[in-house]
């Protein structure tokens, strides 16, 4: 499975089996997280066999069950790090999908277990990503039309359309999809609208756009 296939079949999953994350799957996840942290200046951490984070009222309200593994998305406080959390977190999410795992971005409906991960001075926990072997593969979310998230003078090239279509398959908070992509020759701009975690959502959508459009076809503004 390549990343474009992963985008199309990956859906949010909230119920997981007891199957452990181990062996080569664990090794590849840790390697990806390490590389993303290095590139993005983040401090994401894989938390395994820790059920307390999803064993409270908030998790039950969010209809989570069987969650014992998650990725703590930790980064520095400051401008730009929300988008980085989304961009690099989604890199891990899509790799996980290719490894046969399921995931769900979680911003509110979990409990903070400070002993499960490290937060250094000047850092914060932005959100977590539940991860494991799902009881199901989830269901697709409803998407806006491509035209509603595009600003372009004239007809957009095929690669741009494919990039936007991939971005619309990205998970966003409450499925709000509050982002806009603009094109000027081969320069692409992407902006977040107003909404809960919209900058994190923008980072996720931009990574999807790169996969759909082909990074060789454009430059980010």
Image (cartoon, grey):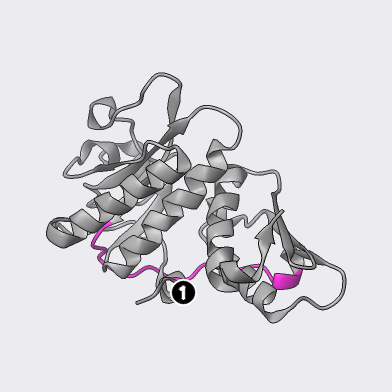
Q: Nearer the viewer, residue 89 or 18?
A: 89
Q: Quadrant of residue 111?
A: top left
Residue farthest to the bottom? 158
Q: Is residue 73 above or below residue 86?
A: above
Q: What percent of the width, then of the height, locates residue 184?
A: 81, 64
Q: Nearer the viewer, residue 88 or 186?
A: 186
Q: Which region of the structure is painted magenta?
A: 132-147
Percent of width and height locating residue 116: 24, 32
- Residue placed at 21% from the left, 47% from the top? 68
Residue depicted at 28% across the width and 30% down the height: 113
Q: Is residue 35 left or right of residue 197?
A: left
Q: Quadrant of the N terminus?
A: bottom left
State the SS at label 1.
helix
* Residue 180: x %, y % from top left: 72, 58
Q: Which residue is mark 1?
A: 4
Crowd band around label 1 with a 10 angstrom C-alpha radius: few (<14), some (14–19), many (20+): few
* Membership of 146 in magenta stretch: yes
The image shows residue 95 at horizontal and vertical percentages of 35, 62
Q: Is residue 117 above or below residue 36?
A: above
Question: In the image, what residue occupies the spot 62% across and 55% down?
Answer: 176
User: In this orientation, which residue lies closer to the viewer: 58 or 8?
Assistant: 8
């Amino acid at each position: 499975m390549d990343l474009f296939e992963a985008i199309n079949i990956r859906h949010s999953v909230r119920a997981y089996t007891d199957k452990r994350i181990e062996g080569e799957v664990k090794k590849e996840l840790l390697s990806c997280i390490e590389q993303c942290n290095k590139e993005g200046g983040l401090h994401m951490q894989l938390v395994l066999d820790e059920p307390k984070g999803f064993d409270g009222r908030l998790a039950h309200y969010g209809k989570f069950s069987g969650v014992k593994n998650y990725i703590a998305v930790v980064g520095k406080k400051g401008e730009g790090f929300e988008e980085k959390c989304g961009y690099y977190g989604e890199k891990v999410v899509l790799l996980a999908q290719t490894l046969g795992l399921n995931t769900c971005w979680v911003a509110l409906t979990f409990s903070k277990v400070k002993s499960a991960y490290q937060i250094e001075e000047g850092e914060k926990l932005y959100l977590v990503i539940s991860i494991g072997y799902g009881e199901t593969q989830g269901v697709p979310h409803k998407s806006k039309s491509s035209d509603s998230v595009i600003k372009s003078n004239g007809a957009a090239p095929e690669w741009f359309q494919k990039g936007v279509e991939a971005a619309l398959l990205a998970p966003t908070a409450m499925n709000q999809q509050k982002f806009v992509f603009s094109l000027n020759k081969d320069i692409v701009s992407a902006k977040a609208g107003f909404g809960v975690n919209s900058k994190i959502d923008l980072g996720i959508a931009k990574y999807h756009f790169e996969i759909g459009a082909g990074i060789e076809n454009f430059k980010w503004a």
